[in-house]
Amino acid sequence: MLREFEIFSKPSFPSIAVKRGFSWPGFFFTWIWAFSRGLWLHGAILTVVGTLIWVQDVTLLAANPLAIILPGLLVNLTVGLRGNSWRSRKLERNGYQFVGLVEARSAASAVAAYSLGKSRVSSRAGALASALGVPRFAQGLFAIAGLTWKAALRFRLFLAIAVLLLLAVVGLPILIKDDGTARGFTQILLTYTLSAITALLGISTLWLSCGTLARDIEECQIQVVATKPIARWQIWIGKWLGIIALNAALLLLSGACVYGLLLWRATKLPAAEQIILRNEVMVARGSIKPPDVQADIAKVAHAVLEDRLKHSPVTEADLPEVQKQIEEQVKAQYQVVPAGYIKTWEIKLESGKSLKGEPLQLRIKFNAAQKPASGTINGFWQVGVPGKTQFWRSEAMSLAPDTFHEFEVPADLADTNNVLTIAFANMNDTAVLFPLEDGMEILYRQGSFGMNFARGLGIIFCWMALLAAIGLASASFLSFPVAAFLSLAILTMALSSGTLTTVVSEGTIDTNSSATGNPVVSALNVVIIPMFRAALKVINLARDFSPIDSLSSGRSISWGDLGLAFVQIVILLGGFFAVFGIFIFNRRELATAQSQ
Amino acid sequence: MTVVENRKSEIVNPKSEVVVSVRGLTKVFKDFWGRPKARAVDNVDFDVRRGEVFGLLGPNGSGKSTTVKLLLGLLNPTKGHCEVFGHSSRHVPTKARIGYLPEESYLYRYLNSRETLDFFGNLFQLGKDLRDNRAEQLLEMVGLNQTRMRSVGEFSKGMQRRIGLAQALINDPDLVILDEPTAGLDPIGCREVKDLILALARRGKTVILSSHLLSDVEDVCDRVVIYYGGKIQAMGTLKELLARPDTLRITTPVLPRETLERVLQVIRHDIATDKVRVDNPTQNLESYFLDVVQKARAAQETSGAQSGARVAEYLRGGVAEKPATEKILEKLALPETKPAAAAPVTPAAPAADEKKLEQLTKASEPAPAPANPAPAAAKPADLSKADEKLSSLLGGKSGKP
C-alpha cells in the first residue's frame, strides 16, 4: 500500500522521509519509539507518564480493568496520532527543510523516489494539518460523521433535543415533588430523569439514524457521495459514528445536569435522609447474593418426579405440567420460612479482604403467605454465629412484605472462611417466603458514585449505539417513513418482551389453558416457543443491564459490567445490524430514486 | 486553422487508451415483484478513449442518464458490463479519477459552497491546504466567490449547477462525466461550461457529456452516440455523422463570377445541371438528430418520454394544434435549412442559382464565413483564458490524491 511521506533535506546531510498521518510503531512502542527516533524530550515525558500510569494501575485501579487500559490507550493514541508531526517539527528545528511529498511503500523508497525527482510540493501547513491526526483512510469517514453533526446543528435538531433533555432534567423534579425521603428524592431525580433522557434520546436516535441515510438516498445526495472514492461501508459507519458522537455529547450534557442537580438538591434534604442518601444511593455498592440453588432444585425436583411416576404414571401430555408443578413445590421449600421457624443463609464474602472493617447492608424482600392484620411481618435477624464469630442481633423488626428493606449490620461478622451466616426467625402466624432471585442480598461499599454514574451513562450510550445501528440498517433498504416505523416496531417489541417471557415460561402460547393445568401442545407451540426463546435471548443481550435501577439503588456498575454491555449491545447486537445494513446498502442501487 | 480545428484534427487516435468500455450493457428496471417494467438501456456497446469529448445524445427517457449511472456504479447492469479505467464501475480507488456532475443539484442544502467543496475534497482525501486552495480557485472559476458563506439551499438553480460543477472538478479528474451541464445556466454560464470542457479535453482529460441540447454537443464533442428507446441509433464522430458522402463540396475562396461560371461549365459538362448546387452543404446536428429519432420511433417503442404530445384541448381553446414535431419538420423543410436526405436536394430553378451566385459574388469583399463561424472565432481567446485558469487551478498532476 502506498503511503505519503514528507521529505526533509539539509545541505550535506542525507534526506529524511517522515510518514504522514498515523504512526503505528509510535502507537505500539510509545517511549521506545520516541527514543529510537531521537525525540528525547518526548521519550522522557512518555516514560514518566507511562510509569505513573503503571503505578496507578497497580495500586489504585486494580479492580477496574478498563480503567487500567484507558489511560494507557490514550497515551498510545496520542503518540500514534502526533508522533510523526513531532518528528517533522524536530527536523525543521534542526535545520532541515520540507521539500515535498512522495508516495511510496517505505521511507527508504520515498527518499529514493525523491532523489529521482518524483515528488510534488505541498505546503507545511497541509503537512501539519494532516499530522493533526485524521489518518488518510479515515478522512472520508470523518467527513461523513462531521456532515451528520452539521445537519443536526443546522436543522436545529441538536438544539431541540438538548432543550427537551434539559427540560426533562430540570422540569421533572420541579413538576413532581418528592416526599422528602432519600428514596423518593432518588426516585424522581435519578429514576425519572434518567428514564426520560433514555426515552428521548432513544427516539431521536432512531429518527435521526433513519433520516440521515434514507433521506440522502431519497433526495439523491448519496448519488454524488457514492461516486467519490469512499466505500459504502465507510459511508454507513461514518453516519453511525456521527450519530453516536451526537448522542455522546447530548448524554454528557444531560448527565452532567442530572449529576449537578442531584448534588445540589441533596443538600436540601433533612440530615437523617442525607445520611441514607449517602449510604444507599450516592455510593457504588457491590452485591453478594446467596449461592445459586437452581441446580439443586432441578436435581431434587427430578428425583421427586421419578418417585411420583413410579407410583402414579401420568400421560405424556401432562408430563411437562406435572414437572413444572413439582419444580415450583421444591423451589418453595427453598424459599419458605414457616411460622415459628428460623431460616439461615450462609454467604461466602468473595472480596472479604477489602471488606475488613466495612459495615454491610442487608437488602431483603419477602412475601407473606397470608396478609397479616397489622400489615407488617415481625421477625428477628441475626448475623454471625454466637460462640464462633462476632455476631449482631436485631431488635424485633416489623417490616412490610413485598417491598425491599435495607438495614446496616456491623463490620467483621464473617467467620475465618469469610462466610457470613444470616438467620431470620419468623415470629408470625403465617409463613414468609424469601424469593430466590432477590430475597436476600448483601451490599458493600465498592466505589464512588461519580464513576458509577459515568459507567451507568456508558451503558445507556451503548443502547443508543445499538438504536443508531437499527435505524441505519432499516434505512439501508427502506424509505424514511417505513424505516422509522420498522425501527420503532423493533424497539417496542424489545421493550414489551413480557409477553414473550410469559409464553416461554409457560411453554405454550395458549396461556388460558395453562391455568387449568392442561396445556395445548399444538404444532404452533413447537414452532413458536423456540422462536420466542431465541428472540428473548437476543433481546436480553441488551435488556440484561439495568443501569438506572442500579444507580437509584446505589448498586455498583462495574467496569466489567460496562465492558460486557459494550460487547453484548454494541459489538454483538449492533454488529449484527451493522453487517446486515452494510450488506444491503452495498448491494442497493442508489440511483433509482428521483429527487423531489 | 483555429485551436479548435487543431484539436479536432487530432481526432482521437483509435489506438489510444480506452477510458470507458461498455459491452452489451443492458438495464431493465423491474417492479416490486421482479417483473420487467422498462428496458432503459438495451445492449449498448461503445468505447471512450483518453482525451475525447464524448456526447450521449437522446430525447428524454432514452437511456442517457441511466448509462451514466451504470458507468458510475450507481445502478447495476442487468446484462453486459462496463469498465472505467480498466476496472469495474464499483471499484472505489478508480473513483478518485472521476468527476461527476449529476443532472440535478444533489448537494447538501445546509452546507455553504465553501463547506460543500471542503466536504467533497475530504472524500477525495485531499490535504487541507490543497482543499482550501482548490476550493478558492474553483469558487472563483464558477463565479461564486462572493457567496461562499451562503447555504446551497438558498442558491438559484444556475448557482447550484455552478457549485455542482465545482465539486465535480475538486479532484482534478481524468474523466469528467457531465449530465446536462448547462441545464439552468444562463448563456454566459453555458459558454463558460463549453470552454471549460474544451480546456479539459486539451489537457488530456476525457469528458462524457450527456445532453439533449444539440448545440452543447455540437460545439464541444468529438464523438457522439444518439440514443432512442435505450438503444444506440447512431454513433461516430460529428464529421462522420454529419457529412454527406454522396455529395462533394469544393471549398474555395470567393471566385470572380467569370471564373465560377467557367468552373460550373466544366462541371456541367459531366453532371446534369439540376445536380449541381452552389451552397453550403453542411447538415446541422439538430436536423440529423431529429431524423434519427423519427426513424427510430417508426421502428420501435420507448419507455421514455414521447415527443409530440399534444397540448390538452381545454388549454388550446378548441384550436387544433399540430404536434411539435410536425412544426419542427415544417421549419426544417424551409429552403434555407432543408433537412438531410439520402439524395442531394436540387434547387428549384437555374434562375435561383444565378441569384444566389450573384449574392455570393457581392459578398466577396469580407472574408468568407467558415462552416461554423461563431464558436470557432470566439474560441481561441476564450480557451486560452479558461486553460490558464485551469492550469493554475489544477497545477498539473500535483493534485492527485
Image: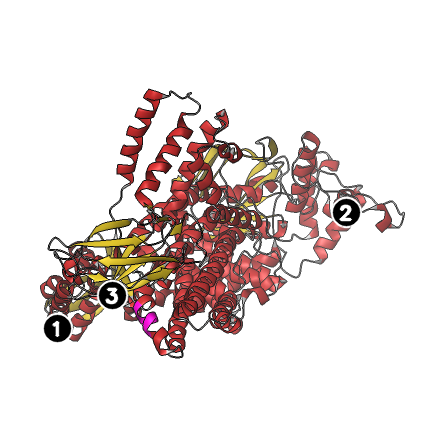
According to the picture, the residue beneath numbered tag 3 turns out to be: A447
Q: Which of A23 and B20 is in front in this view?
A: A23
Q: Residue at x 52, y 60 (%)?
A: B108
Q: Residue A559's spot in the image, x, y percent?
A: 26, 58
| Amino acid found under the numbered disc labelled 3 | Gly
What residue is rendered at 55% in x and 44% in y? A592
Q: Name the residue under label 2.
A: B331
Say whether residue A118 is visible: no
* Co-location on one chain, circles 2 and 1: no
The answer, for residue B352, to whether it is visible in the render is: yes
A421 versus B389 height, above or below: above
Range shown magenta = A275-279
Q: How many labels does the image show?
A: 3
Q: Residues within 10 Å of mark 3 (few under 14, many from 20)?
A: some
* Identity, as a three-letter code, of the amino acid under mark 1: Leu
Say which of B156 and B109 sits in front: B109
Q: What element carries label 2?
A: helix
On whether disc 2 and disc 3 are found on a single subunit, the reply is no
Q: Picture coordinates of residue A322 (x, y %)?
A: 40, 29
